[in-house]
Image (spheres, rainbow, N blue to C red):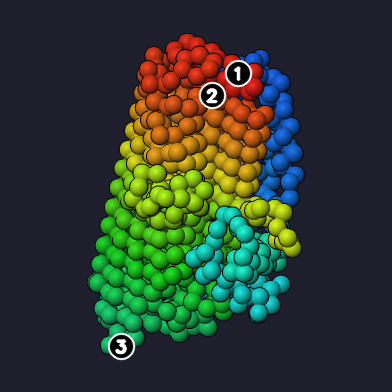
Amino acid sequence: MPAKRPLFAILLVLALGHGALPTSQSLALALADDTQSDKAWPEPAVPRIQKDIQGEIDRRLAKPQAATLSSLSEASILPAKFKAPFIVQTLTSPWTGMAAIEQFGLDLAAQARSGQRLPELISVMEKGMGRRAEPPAFIPAPKEKEAIAQMAYLVAVLQQAIQLREQALSKINQADRQFLFDHAAALAERFSPQISGLDEEARPQAEKDRRFFQLVGERLDYASLIAAAQVLTRLSDEDWLNSLAESFQAHRPLEMTIPGITGDVLLVRETSTGLIVIGGFGPNTYELDQRIALLIDLGGDDLYQGLIASPATAEQGLSIVIDLAGQDTYRAAPLGLATGRLGIGLLVDRAGDDRYELAPGSGGAGFAGLGLLDDGAGQDRYAGTRFTLGAAVGGLGLLLDRAGRDSYASAGFSIGFGGPVGVGAVIDLGGDDFYRCDEGLPSHDNQAEQPEAKPGDPSFQYDCFGLGTGSGQRVFPKNLTGSSLDELAGGWGILIDLAGNDRYGSSNFSQGAGYFFGAGIKLDLSGHDDHGAARYGQAAGAHGGLGLFIDYDGNDRYGSTGPVYNGGAAWDRSVTLGIDAGRGSDVYDFLRSSGLGLADHHAWGLFIDEGGTDRYLAPQGLGTAFNESLGGFFDLGGEDDYAQVPQPRLGRRGNRLTLVDPAGALFQDR
């Protein structure tokens, strides 16, 4: 069995996205104790693909390739605040950057799958974030099982974490702290990737957004905040939690009534950071507010409502909920479940078929903080609105689901979304899962393209910005009179599914998509999957965005509701790479869209199918380039069906054919 790995090790790899881009050597050091091999674990696909096809590109498209790379290098220096180093590197050297991004995702997946325990590795974590703060001296868990020793440990851990959180905010005054806390609600409700027009209502919001990101990016000591999170994750250690449950096995319930709580309560302790509550082994209901800093429930089918593992005030800073067993229901208030709001929100549910009903800004969401949701075994249902399920701006949001056939549904900016100065991720370790992000946010493209279309019409478009999407905030048009707003580069959005026959359904900008110097990653490591997207999906990017999509195994189906840009589609100095690895027999139904290696306006977009008996239904794309771009399509093996691919001006696509467009496009079937 692989060695067990901690949650903070997963956070380390997430955090690398906003430090220096990891090299293979640095990642090897970080993962030095994960030495056992696993034959089922996929080998990195990007270096293998590069070795196989780059020679063809060099030989047939040398001149347009050079022009495209020059344009991308120019894009890397275009002004946008908080542009991450990995964005610059990938725009400068697409293959190098994409290989490092893939390795980042695979290492994140390897750490996530490797165990239930959550010990500490703070010094490596801070190094990955580019911080040099000294790691704290961790308080050892008690060996004694008496309740008094357990309580002393809990109090000490909370005090240590709150001190680190205060250190993180030491350069931020009280007024700015309150602003950061309050403005998180506006971001969850109204964040937009593009500011258009700057009318009287839009400009004040945009100015506040910039104040928020400047405070986080320039004055928040994020290394200390990471350290506070690592201290708290020690409370999720499996062995210690089992010991704690044993300590309270014989405790009689308290006779006192606690406002907001029904069911057995075994202990209540007042501390300087708030109440510590130990719930009993039977069913409970919890209406949570700012009084409770730490709640541990030992069992039963429980109902949680309100602010669940989410700081309630700018002063509180920390909130932790740990549920050991039961079929539980969580009904979150806005910014109210596993939400890091100017601090740390940590929710751990170890077992049970659970239901999460999520308001905006919850479900592993970070706003100037870290929001962490770790769900163990069970068939779980996550139902969210916008900005939920592994989403972050100015922080880190993580949803880790360890087992079960799960469903994820949201309305946008979710299921792995990273906005400016943000890293958001969903990682699912197993089960036949369902992901949906559509029909929640009407797209601005409707007004320009289909002004008469109404919700429900086939041509009516929605935005997702999720399932592995990173986005900045672009000011448009740029020649506005009196406009002095900085444009903001995007962060990481990550979706990784390790196993199972999964279904994905999403609208515009999703499934490995990047917008305005943001990066999106979607990796599916095994299973026969159905990937359904819309405009800008399945490795897509616009305005300096990066999109990486890799399905490593299985007989998969790809589809799109259109109208354009799927499967390695890049626009305006973006870099995208879509790969279906292995030898599966796949179906690509893009009759309502375009893509599979399509690039326009100085962009770089490739799509590669490694093998299998595949069927292609696509009216536009399969290696197409416009306006000094590089677009390529490669099918590297198998007898494929191109019968429903119309004949373009270069000739009909088919088996064992190579078609070259000197403008910058290449189709090749081997």
Q: Nearer the viewer, mark 2 or mark 3?
A: 2
Tell me if label 1 and label 2 are in contact, CB under 8 Å.
Answer: yes
Disc 2/disc 3 C-alpha distance (Å): 69 Å
The location of residue 158, given as percent across then percent down, is: 52, 73
The residue under label 3 is 257
Disc 1/disc 2 C-alpha distance (Å): 9 Å
The residue under label 2 is 623
Q: Is residue 450 left or right of residue 80?
A: left
Q: Is residue 95 above or below residue 143?
A: above
Choose top left, top right, bottom left or bottom right for residue 89.
top right
Q: Nearer the viewer, residue 252 or 520?
A: 520
The circle on residue 661 is: 1
Task: Tell me which label, 1 or 3, sits earlier in the chain.
Answer: 3
Q: Nearer the viewer, residue 625 or 587?
A: 625
Q: Amino acid at mark 1?
A: Asp
**Label 2: element kind:** loop
